[in-house]
Amino acid sequence: MTFISNVLSGIQSTGLFSRAGSWGDPMTRLCGQPSRFCNSIGFSLRHNQAKFTYSPHKHVPTRRCSTLMKVPLPAGEAEAVSNGSAVDAVVTVHGSVRPDWKLERFPLSSGTAAVLRERGITELTEIQALTFDDMRNGLDVIGRSHTGTGKTYAFGVPMVERLAAARGGERGARGRPPSALVLTPTRELAKQVTEQLRQIGQPHDLRVECFYGGASYGPQEDALQRGLDIVVGTPGRILDHIERNTLDLSQVRIAILDEADEMLSMGFAEDVERIFNEMPSKNERQTVLFSATVPPWVQKIAAQHQRTPVIHDVVGKTETRAAKNVRHVAVRVPEADFARLAMLEDIIFAHAGSGNQRCIVFTGTKREADEIAMAGSIFRGSVAQVLHGDVSQRQRELTLQQFRDGRFSVLVATDVAARGLDIHEVDVVVQLRPPRDADTYIHRSGRTGRAGRSGTAVTMYSDAERGLLRSLERGASIRFEHVGPPTLERVLDVAAQNAARAVGEASTNQVVPHFQQAADELATVQFEGDARRALAAALAVISGRTHIEHRSLLTGEIGLRTLLLTLNQPEISPRDVLGIVRRLSQGGKLFSDDIGKVRLCRNPRQAVFDVSVESADEILRRIQSSGTQDESASKSTSPQSAASSRNGTSEHSKAMDYSIEVCAELPELRVDDYRFSPGRLERRRGRSLDDDADRVYLNGRTRDLPGGRTGRRERSSRTRGGRPLPRRSVSYTGDLD
């Protein structure tokens, strides 16, 4: 649009983007009033791009802005502006600008500023700075920001400033009804909001109380009789007080919905409607919605309760919607629940590392959370507690406090903990299964990486859940880092470090002398004086790792080992893997019957494959006894040559030098994967293991493998119009038997 082009040209001509520094001086020189200018024009800089948003309001005259920037305002665009529309444009600029959002640049009272500085806050975050003027001036606001960016202070600080200014320093009357109402979807979030509002409201003698279910009515009713300024609560308990005629909302001038997307979902919409009916009309109150996600349907519902709201979206549709300092990891696991649960603690160990790390595990149901937290076989080296809707309020508070204090390291929770819990020390979030929607993933993963800390969000998924994973990537604008299950060596190393740390913390404990005699006898008798070995055994018992449990690095299945095959030729194929393993089987067990999943590596000479633990040990023994250069093991005729010999043709056999070793850590893999199922197909088709199939189903087509024989095409379970949808990976069950 012409107007936008002229504005951008005018801004660039001021030199605003020509140097790195605060935008205070250039903005003041441009329009004279930085705070009012920010209400109409906001910049969100990332790399070398600036997002330009023109959103004029009544208190920022349109003609004034256009005059100050010396740009014409066409008639058609002037009409659009008068209707409150917003225009977005992205322009590439040179240099970077660091906005100056220090406290001194905002009209804060001395009491509020002092409290913020005591809390270590010297400048506002982006969402706090961009919404401050609109909130302070009484406009309806919708604020959207990443989790952990201070949304509570974004509405709390200007709300307290408004209430304090309206009171004018006078003491509140006894029995006064509240002037502000803050609704939250969970009790935990309500308590956290109340604590922060009390801190910034204390210098102004503002009384703040928290109403939530599970607590006694008596103290809450006593607080109402004494008089309140701000009520924070959950919809259920607020409605209870309304029905008991103990809460009067007729004087509410500020209504705030925190985590608005959850509050205005189908489950809460009716409760919110009933509460809003008890308050003055939307023309007589300020209504504010804050959340990490504001989907279009929330805006539609919010239109019923707001007057031309000002939308401040500091996330944007083109940026990642999840927290920026969170690493998003996807771990492929078996479909079976027992295998998934068996890998859970290993995944926590691998990604949390050693030390007093805290982790939240999210489950889909309360029953599943109880089973995980109460099952001693799942967490051998960690202490876990559960948090969900059936836990009593007293126990919830105790559990959260103990988790914050580091009394236990794993909190198993349902989504009740994903809404508003502000625990800065959470290092890892593990989701037992991919959630069904991106908003849930954003809130779950947002429990880590808060307050500037980095974090890791791990999602466990099976082959059947790949579609959900891709949907989350699109919906949350993220890209998962795909990793394999943790290696046994990594898990044991972390377990040993954690056990050693626990022993070190008990070194000054008064009970230690009572164990010294038993320790001397243990080291002398059972370990023949080897104190170091005795201590290592004690650490193993403390960690709960008293025996080796082999799992596949590709699928996590118990009882399998992953081997790495390196072939001394330009490129390896799945047929080469099968042919070499067959050759090693001559004169003994048929190892090819035990081959599971096969993955080709980015290194074209390498492949990894699963076999049973017994077969893996025997394969390695034969490799070690004969050597990789031995004729019987390291030189084999290619499967193509074998097929030609059976057909009566003569073909010179090709020698293949190779090595096989235990795969300690998965190398970078290709997207294709193969699975051999010879036993099933042999019984079904009656063919020998010497017959070879050479085609796979890949990306919607049947493609050739070296050798030329046609394999069976596997039908995809995902179809469109009877045709299989393209797939990024291969599940091959062709005639390789």
Image (spheres, rainbow, N blue to C red):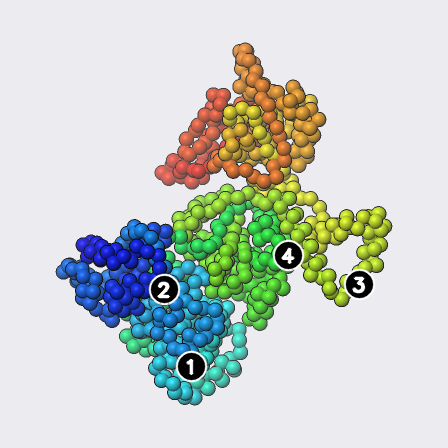
Looking at the image, is mark 4 or mark 2 nearer the viewer? 2
| Residue located beneath label 2 in the image | 100
| Residue located beneath label 1 in the image | 204
Report the residue at 47% width, 32% height from top. 714
| Residue located beneath label 4 in the image | 382
Residue 285 location, x and y as percent? 32, 75
Of helix, strand and loop, which one carries label 3? helix
Report the residue at 57% width, 53% height from top. 352
Give the CA distance from mark 4 to mark 2: 45 Å
Q: What is the quadrant of the N terminus in the image?
A: bottom left
Looking at the image, is mark 1 or mark 4 nearer the viewer? 1
Is residue 212 placed above or below 176 in the rendered structure? above
CB of mark 1 within 8 Å of CB of mark 4?
no
Give the CA distance from mark 1 to mark 2: 27 Å
User: Tag 4: residue type?
Assistant: Ser
CB of mark 4 within 8 Å of CB of mark 2?
no
Q: Earlier in the sequence, mark 3 or mark 4?
A: 4
Of helix, strand and loop, which one carries label 2? loop
Give the CA distance from mark 1 to mark 3: 56 Å
Q: Counting other residues with Cα less than 10 Å from the Cα at mark 1, is it few (<14), some (14-19), or many (20 or more)?
A: many
Residue 78 location, x and y as percent? 17, 62
Report the residue at 53% width, 19% height from top. 640
Q: Earlier in the sequence, mark 2 or mark 3?
A: 2
| Residue located beneath label 3 in the image | 513
Looking at the image, is mark 1 or mark 2 nearer the viewer? 2
Is residue 581 placed above or below 287 in the rendered structure? above
Give the CA distance from mark 1 to mark 4: 45 Å
Give the CA distance from mark 2 to mark 3: 59 Å
Report the residue at 54% width, 11% height from top. 650
Left or right, residue 96 beside residue 622? left
CB of mark 1 within 8 Å of CB of mark 2?
no
Q: Earlier in the sequence, mark 1 or mark 3?
A: 1
